[in-house]
Structure formats: C-alpha cells, structure tokens
Amino acid sequence: MKKGTLVCDFSGAYGAQGFLGWLEENAAEAQVLELKGLEGTSCYCDAESALEIGRMLPENLPGLRWLDSGDYHYMSHLLALREMKPFHLLLLDNHPDNQEPAFGGGVLSCGSWVKAMREENPLLEDVLWIGPENGDYLEWMEDRRGERLYISLDKDVMAPQWARTDWSQGEFGLTQVEEILKLAMTKMDIAAIDICGETPPSKGATPEDMRINFETNTKLYNLICQN
C-alpha cells in the first residue's frame, strides 16, 4: 500500500475533533482535500460533483484515505476508479450499501456505491461484506491469499463505545475490527484502506462524540501505518 494519508474534508469533523492537528504533529504526510461548500455531495453525489471531485483528487493517491461522515461513503467508489489492477473489496459496515439509488441512474449515493462499483468498475473481482451477519472472512481471505484487496471501513459497524456516527450502529468492538484489519494486511496485498463514520458538529456532535471518534481514529491510524 502506498504511504501517506488523504483526508477528504467535507464537514470539518476532523478539524473539530483534533485529528487534523494530531496528524500534523505526528508528521503523517497528510494531504487535505478541501471539499466543504461543494454542492451536490451530502448523502448523494450528482454527476457534476463527481467529476469535480475526480479533478481535485491528487494524481498519486495515498493508500490510507479518510472520507469524513458516512454520508460520503460513496467516495470509496470514486477513489477505487483510480485502481489500475484487479482487486477485491472488503467492506466492514453496518449496512451493505448496495441499494438502488433513490433518484435513479446517474446519482451516486452513500447507500448505492457498492452496487455502482460492481456495475462500473471492471477491475472489481468480488465483495465481502462484514456487518451484522459477520461474513466468513477467514476462509475468504485464505482463498485469495496474496491478491489485491481494497478495504473500506465504516465505523458504524462498531458499538457507540468505540465510534459515534449519525447512522444506526453495529456491535463490533475496536479490537475485533483491528484483528480483521491485521489479518487482511497479513494475508493479502493491500491496495488501499478508507475509513468513514464521523459525526460533524453540524449534525450535533458532542465533545464526547468527538473525543471517542478522535481516539479511535488515532488507534486505527497507528495500527495501519505500523503494519
């Protein structure tokens, strides 16, 4: 996986919780993509905004990407369109994100991006969703040992003790998520990892919400960058 960190800043959540400052203090080589004020992006991303985001993305994308709130999880699809070799997708999420878009074709959403990726990215080989039903990832990874893997983590898969999101949440603990990530990084060739699931101040994030998200973000960053 390429070194470096990309921060997609739609809502200001990372700055408010102190994560941007922490990245700077820890010499994380973070590139911040300033997306606040870009219209047509909240939960749904229209074609014009998708093109604009594509133009704004750096040519050489870092391997670790922070996507902001789950409202912007469709960024996984836009980022994965930059892949140049076949890959598998491992999705850790309390929701499968494979619905039909509510407004029909041409509008990407946080709930339809997996479906869009299946239909529009010819390099995607298959998808394993780990969520409430907890897919059999041990056998799945073993069968694909050494192959390229894109990991997308929505922190709403975790219980509120570990993440505070603005979507319904699952029951995973941070340790369980870390074990899955470590296993994947051991068995497979990681193309990229993206993470979403913040709650921005504009959606009522409390100081406690931001503290919990900050602490989990720093732990995830350290785990990923030390492996």
Image (tube, grey):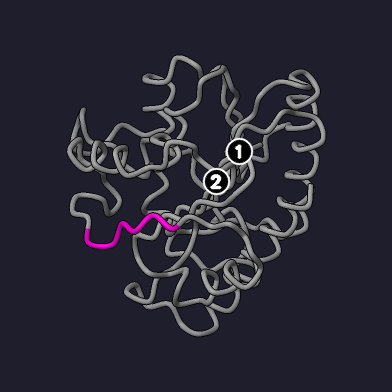
Q: Is residue 115 left or right of residue 37?
A: right
Q: Nearer the viewer, residue 218 or 197?
A: 218
Residue type at the position of mark 2: Asp
Q: Residues within 10 Å of mark 2 (few under 14, many from 20)?
A: many
Residue 5: x and y in percent read 56, 52
Residue 86: x and y in percent read 57, 17
Q: Give the spatial CA distance, label 2 vs label 1.
A: 6 Å
Quarter of image, res 120: top left
Q: Nearer the viewer, residue 31 or 123?
A: 31
Question: What residue do we see at 18% from left, 54% from top?
Answer: 39
Mark 2 lies on residue: 194
Q: Which residues are magenta?
A: 32-37
Does 31 appear above or below 19?
A: above
Pointers 2 and 1 in contact (C-beta within 8 Å) = yes
Identify the element where label 1 is drawn.
strand
Q: Is residue 171 left or right of residue 137?
A: left
State the quadrant of the N terminus: top right
Question: What residue do we see at 73% from left, 59% from top?
Answer: 222
